[in-house]
Image (spheres, rainbow, N blue to C red):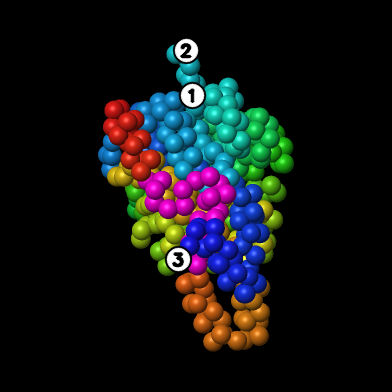
Amino acid sequence: MTNKERYESAKEIYKSIGVDTDAAIAKLAEIPVSLHCWQGDDVTGFDHEGPLTGGIQTTGNYIGKARTPEELMQDMDEAIRLMPGKKKLNLHACYAIFEDGEYADRDKLEPKHFAKWVTFAKERGMGIDFNPTFFSHEKVKDGLTLSSPDEETRKFWIEHGKACIRISQYLAKETGVPCVMNIWTGDGYKDIPADRIGPRMRYKDSIEQILSESFDKNLVKPCVESKVFGIGVESYTVGSAEFTLSFAATHDGCLPLMDNGHYHPTEVVSDKIPALLCYYPEIALHITRPVRWDSDHVVLFDDETKEMAKEIVRCEALERVHMALDYFDASINRVSAWVVGFRSWQKALLNALCTPNEMLKKLQEENRLTELMMMQEELRLYPFGDIWAEYCRQCNVASDKSWFEEVQRYEENVLAKR
């Protein structure tokens, strides 16, 4: 049986439960997912040297790490052509590109420092998302940035945030696609603090000052991202879930961003998505795979990944949820990490679009819970792989593991020679 025949057979099976697989494939092709540049160089960037700080860490030393903007773009291109679906580019401010010996500190960054990224994105039909970089810098004082009691320190980081607002608006205007600008800091304390509210009040004031910078809300989508803990800030993080959700709820135009690695191991973001959608017109996600903590492992097609995608689709919120990948693994081929993670999230979205959500909702509403459980289990063995193969065919990428052969050739011919 040919792949086309297999698809036609699977299409009929899904049609019997009310799912239009052609429509699912067409819908997924319209949904952008933001691809993070920092997987390619272990979150190093181009404006500093030395280790990561701010409660995050990259482990491993696999060959071929990108060392220059050109190498990073080359690696991203290799990854992108092996991924189905629509993409955006996600940048951190530390990926500013300086030319002819020029350098600007983070509080003095300008749109021109990201012009090469704009060219890269426009040539590939992508929008760009953006993140201020509140870590790995000499002006992080005692582990604090926007919540620092030192006014000179806090002012520096506020100015950095304002510069990033201006850069985000530039990116949106140039690409014609709204820019999601995410504010996250690793501010916190290793042990039990004596004052929990003081840092949060300073943090609140700092973000308000950043958002006082003029911007078009149709072009720039500011977000605040929470974190439960990090390396060196195990006991207290200033930007907790309660803080960021409350800030977004009380500041017009600011969105909450949930990273599914930034919660207690017993919490699941799949349950939080529909809760937030009851109140927020839009929300944002950083999609990762935590292993007991915020370890930023490569996204897989696992149960929680599938549930997150299902909730977005069930809530009819594909246009309300801004989706971005966020992980960094230096222990494996970095291009493969990009591809596996992106394809896994694409699989999760397609799987959600091929779920008979109205049927399942009706079973729940009619309290036919035995039948609901049975149907949910039966769906696990439906021929989803044939739908995935057709989607990949339409996107002109390999549907099976043959894409990895290209990654191996790239490693041998490019990465191993760095």
Q: How crowded is mark 3: few (under 14 residues within 10 Å), some or many (20 or more)?
A: few
**Foreground residue, 142 or 310?**
310
Res 202 quadrant in image: top right
Determine the residue positioned at 34% across, 48% down: 232
Residue 388 falls inside the magenta stretch:
yes
Question: Is 414 drawn above or below residue 100 in the view shown?
Answer: below
Instruction: Say what amino acid the circle numbered 3 marks.
Output: Asp
Q: How crowded is mark 1: few (under 14 residues within 10 Å), some or many (20 or more)?
A: many
**SS at mark 3?**
helix
Image quadrant containing the C terminus: top left
- Of badges 2 and 3, nearer the viewer stands 3
What residue would you read off at disc 1? 97
Determine the residue positioned at 29% across, 28% down: 417
Q: Circles 2 and 1: CB distance less than 8 Å?
A: no
x, y percent for residue 38? 43, 38
Instruction: Say what amino acid the circle numbered 2 marks.
Output: Asp
Confirm whether residue 43 shows in the render.
no
Res 328 quadrant in image: top left
**Real-space Cα distance between discs 2 and 1?**
10 Å
What residue would you read off at disc 2? 100
In the figure, is residue 368 to the left or right of 153?
Answer: right
Question: Is 393 drawn above or below residue 49 in the view shown?
Answer: below
Instruction: Say what amino acid the circle numbered 1 marks.
Output: Ile
x, y percent for residue 146? 51, 40
What residue would you read off at disc 3? 303
For residue 52, the mark is none
The residue segment tinted magenta is 383-404
